[in-house]
Image (spheres, coloured by chain):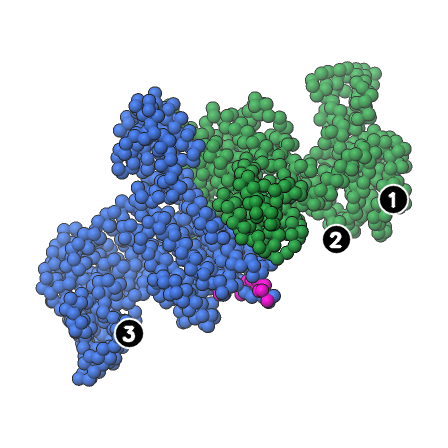
Chain colours: A blue, B green
Amino acid sequence: MHCGLPTAVFYSIACCVASTLSFRFYGDKFDANTDLISVKVCLPFVTFAALNQGEQGFMINVTFPDGAVRQYEAGVSALDVAKSISEGLARKVLAASVNGQVWDATRPINEDATLKLLTWDDTDGKSTFWHSSAHLMAEAVETMFPGVKFWVGPAIDRGFYYDMDLGGKQIGEDDLKALEKKMNELAKQNNAYQRKEIAKAEAIKYFEEKGDEYKLDLLQNLNDGEITFYTQGQFTDLCRGPHIPTTGSIKAIKLMSIAGAYWKGDEKNKQLTRIYGITFPNQKELDEYLLMLEEAKKRDHRKLGKELSIYTMDDDVGQGLIMWLPNGTIIIEELEKLAKETEAEAGYKRVVTPHIAKESMYLTSGHLPYYADSMYPPMELEGEKYYLRSMNCPHHHKIFAAEPKSYRDLPYRVAEYGTVYRYEQSGELFGLMRVRCLHMNDAHIYCTKEQFAAEFKAVNDMYLKYFKIFGIDKYVMRLSLHSKEKLGVKYVNEPELWLETEALVRDVMTEAGIPFIEVQDEAAFYGPKIDVQIWSVIGREFTLATNQVDFSQGRSFKLQYTTQDNTSETPLIIHRAPLGTHERFIGFLLEHYAGKLPVWLAPLQVKILPISEKFIPYCQEVQRQLRKAGVRVEVDERNEKIGKKIREAELGKVPYMAVVGEREMAENKLGLRRQGKGDIGAQAVDEFLNMILEEIRERKSGE
Amino acid sequence: MHCGLPTAVFYSIACCVASTLSFRFYGDKFDANTDLISVKVCLPFVTFAALNQGEQGFMINVTFPDGAVRQYEAGVSALDVAKSISEGLARKVLAASVNGQVWDATRPINEDATLKLLTWDDTDGKSTFWHSSAHLMAEAVETMFPGVKFWVGPAIDRGFYYDMDLGGKQIGEDDLKALEKKMNELAKQNNAYQRKEIAKAEAIKYFEEKGDEYKLDLLQNLNDGEITFYTQGQFTDLCRGPHIPTTGSIKAIKLMSIAGAYWKGDEKNKQLTRIYGITFPNQKELDEYLLMLEEAKKRDHRKLGKELSIYTMDDDVGQGLIMWLPNGTIIIEELEKLAKETEAEAGYKRVVTPHIAKESMYLTSGHLPYYADSMYPPMELEGEKYYLRSMNCPHHHKIFAAEPKSYRDLPYRVAEYGTVYRYEQSGELFGLMRVRCLHMNDAHIYCTKEQFAAEFKAVNDMYLKYFKIFGIDKYVMRLSLHSKEKLGVKYVNEPELWLETEALVRDVMTEAGIPFIEVQDEAAFYGPKIDVQIWSVIGREFTLATNQVDFSQGRSFKLQYTTQDNTSETPLIIHRAPLGTHERFIGFLLEHYAGKLPVWLAPLQVKILPISEKFIPYCQEVQRQLRKAGVRVEVDERNEKIGKKIREAELGKVPYMAVVGEREMAENKLGLRRQGKGDIGAQAVDEFLNMILEEIRERKSGE
């Protein structure tokens, strides 16, 4: 199993890991599969000595997330605090957020602090758990392969890995099994993870004696006062931490795979051995996880996309440029139909605009300074530079500006099935998830400040409507904010407008009672946005849609409307794409439904299977009737056994099969089968037609 | 009025004009408007002396178009032949096609010949008539402005012009009137157009004496034996001819406009005066023509496109790149819906493919060698060249090739609303008629040779179906063939396959009884095609659609299907686009319907006009009912007089207006008006809804 991590990441990983900074390789948040994963990397080591040297014996104020403040003696640990609340809680605590930094739960707190206890339910709790598991694995490796030298061992989005130099020894599946066994033994010893501050000279001495050139290399970039060792059982590692209190919490262990990884990600360097693993606080969760992986493999959209003739790619067309086969096109068209209906009801107007525009447009919009890396290079023509568009917004702004607007025209909602082109590095391309040509149910809403809240909320409500249709039960809305440091570089340089619009969005979300989390430095270049994260039925996370506020482009494009008082104002703009891109959404749907699309989306809805040739005319007549009513139906006229016909229709994931023999023909009926469920009895043709038409009309998602 | 002719054309025009070689400025055949016209230019002068020197007194065989052969004495003229048939016919004869060359009807025929008498109903008859009219105008000009010098005076698609040097004199409308009068006088003199062969030296002497440097310039490129003078009345011109027998046939004259034109089209040269005119054999036709022009002005798609908010363009997006406003998008979507329904019934599958592809694809397809000039320049990316596509076919070939095909899969019909980009010179761009981004209801049919005839005919039948829907009564199918001389340059170099497929198409058309004409050197680079010419209701001609055979790309792309005998064959490919491009077709529809689109195409179908505020709730309820049924409806809620509301809805070309006052509300009715027709009485809401729904469903074209 080859690890798909880009080299730049390896290089920046230090030996120990604690931050939430995450690299996203495939889609804004999509984890393509288990060997294509996000990595949590170290923040720069911070000076913690000062924090650690407070005097004991006096009282400090500890503020909890709900705002409650309690007094504790200085030197109290998060674990102590948990115990003071309940033993049950204490057993769950894995780490703590102390004044916003993730700490060992056992580390003394010596001054007033805000405190959040971190458990398995917290991302940072999980991350600490997995990083500690990496140390546990290292201990097992060292026991079994003395002389091994370790490089870095971070937690990743799902589990952890450790890179190591086994001195040329090749290991295999059996070794993983043995290591798992050893890890389980060591975990049961319930050893504490012990933190020790150490002087640089002493640390160097330690690893020189051990002959460990890797850790010595890491030490080069560290200074006195920021170096710590962590020890559990017989294993000591240079590590910033934090770690969980004891190995005993690690109850279920699975080492997933072995890969090669160049030292520091440089292919000129030595190749190290990387072992990937994942651990859980109980066996049940591990079992579920492995089951999910198994499911995910079966549901892989690339595999299903091929089996069900959904899409294709071709080297002569280009990488990342999807060609939708007839079956895929039916899905696209059904999604479009849904969006058109929904948007027509919601008062959107539709437009059609070209895929290219001149350089001047993208200089005005700000795409060229801020988004140039994601655009295809220009075509030069008669002294002009034309760009393939990477977003639809500037064209829509031109539509707004084409005719004078007054307050009566607002909110002006413009929708388009826009196709955009984005220049993704070829190494980042992946199936339908990361592509270079994106079809998007895109729209822009031009409104007054007073209309903003209602419009923004209406868009969020539209998401929820879609989620219901597609059976998406788990989702999170993420308010993505700017970063002050990157104003003028990644974000338009309007510090006050940023704060103002961010507050505007926050207020709308709060007032509407929509749960959301806030994330720094993830906004669009022109304003804050809501990113919508959804989970497929097997628990994988996808970033789907965005709802963005734009205070910037309206001014750049000099968009104006006449107010009731006959003055001119610039509208606020909402950018929204509730179904995200067709590409990613259909990829999601294939996984979500395991290819068994609901009837309304299924490329072929009914397959009529005559038992023998003599029933073909009757089948054709039924086909005619169904087609006339708009049902997608085919007759399998081949001279094959009915068993084979059924088997192939099942594999093709056709929702309904209608078997026709003597009796069905005589009674003007169909012998019906539901895909994956077998025989569901005979029905009169009319009756079946009414049933399936209702299922289509209602867009029922059940199988 | 400025003449939009490109400079290159002026340069190549000689003083007299007779060929059918036509320049097309706006659209393959579309005549954008009267100042943007096609020009008939001279073929190289041919040696006719030989033809003219036959002996008289013996008999020659004259073969008529129907194959009949008659004997005449050598020296007989076409006019004599006509007289021998009937005096009535003779009065109509304007010129003659003798052995395929257009001649004076009065010129002696001295050897066996095929003969076609040309009248006003023949393109070459008209062209001769107009060229003779240019000479008549020149005679009038010379009478009124002695000392004038003439440059060239060709017939054009509609009428003629003559370029002249008036020695700095400015002329105006009054002069045109006076010239018309003078021309009428001269025409009534019924002078003969007399042809005279002349030696070069003599010709030079004549014009030297006249001090005419322009004709002397023309003479430079002519040789002895190919120089003729034509004289009518007092006017003599250097001219190849042919001309009509006498000026008396010119019964109705209109001089249209005056423009400036640089000598030889070079702006460094002197500016000459150009006078445009048109003539007819009777006043009625002239009146109709002027009426048509008046209508065409009102129906100008650019004017209507703006008034009805159909489309816009923007300098930041780029010239020729149409942005479809909401109203235009409704028309596009209705056309798409029609095409989708039609194609679904005809067994087409739909696909979606990207707008770009790599260079290798277009090298394979042949677009790069044969069509490069019409493509945008490449984008270079990671060492690859990507091109914006100018045709959809190669992507569709890749769709065909994506999965193995057998004879069972054929005919495989793939349709897409493809957008293509073509690099038109900026000077050639014109409204919706000549653009750089084209939306196309495009499809490709892959079939066996045996299936070809039925498929090709089915496509032609689809045209006819569409023509009926859009009320297109006049159309011509034109079989465009290759040119042997341009094999390997403009056409793939497969001489035998060209002949074979051209015969194939000819046979299909003949067998199906579809009338068509044949044109040389107009094929696609990969095979022969049928171009469909249609005429709008006011008699303007548009080239709409094509139906092309392709024997070449299937082989280039190595497309294969397995035959029933388990061998591999390359399919024939039909390229077809019955509605042409959205851009041109909607431009045509705007003119054809004068913006008064049939209800099914109208962006707004019903406008409800409350007489006062108190009827608004009722109007809104009616609106809700109509909208629910899918009707596009709005309520004019403004506090305006009903007269103004009606006037504006009329101007907006909304098919139905529903006036609502006390009585309508009380009786649950609507006071209906039909656009352009006024009051059509009150109707119950239900009744109206049923009526309009039927009108929409049936796509009725009547107003």
Residue B528 percent location from the top left of the image = 56, 31
Dot 2 or dot 1: first in sequence order is 1
Badge 3: how crowded within 10 Å, few (<14), some, or many (20+)?
Answer: few
Three-letter amino acid code of the residue under disc 2: Lys
Residue wearing tag 2: B268
Asked whether A554 falls inside the magenta stretch, the response is yes
Which callout, 2 or 3, points to the residue nearer the camera? 3
Label number found at residue B178:
1
Residue B491 visible in this rendered orientation of the protein = no
**Helix, strand or loop at mark 3:** loop
Callouts 2 and 3 close, C-beta under 8 Å: no
Q: CA distance from mark 2 to mark 3?
A: 85 Å
Callouts 3 and 1 close, C-beta under 8 Å: no
Q: Residue at x 40, y 41 (%)?
A: A697
Residue wearing tag 3: A67
Q: Residue at x 27, y 48 (%)?
A: A296
Residue B452 percent location from the top left of the image = 49, 27
**Helix, strand or loop at mark 1:** helix
Three-letter amino acid code of the residue under disc 1: Ala
Q: Is residue A552 found left or right of B97 in the rendered image? A: left
Q: Residue at x 74, y 49 (%)?
A: B2
Asked whether A404 falls inside the magenta stretch, the response is no
Q: Which residues are magenta?
A: A551-565
Give the total number of marks visible in the rendering.
3
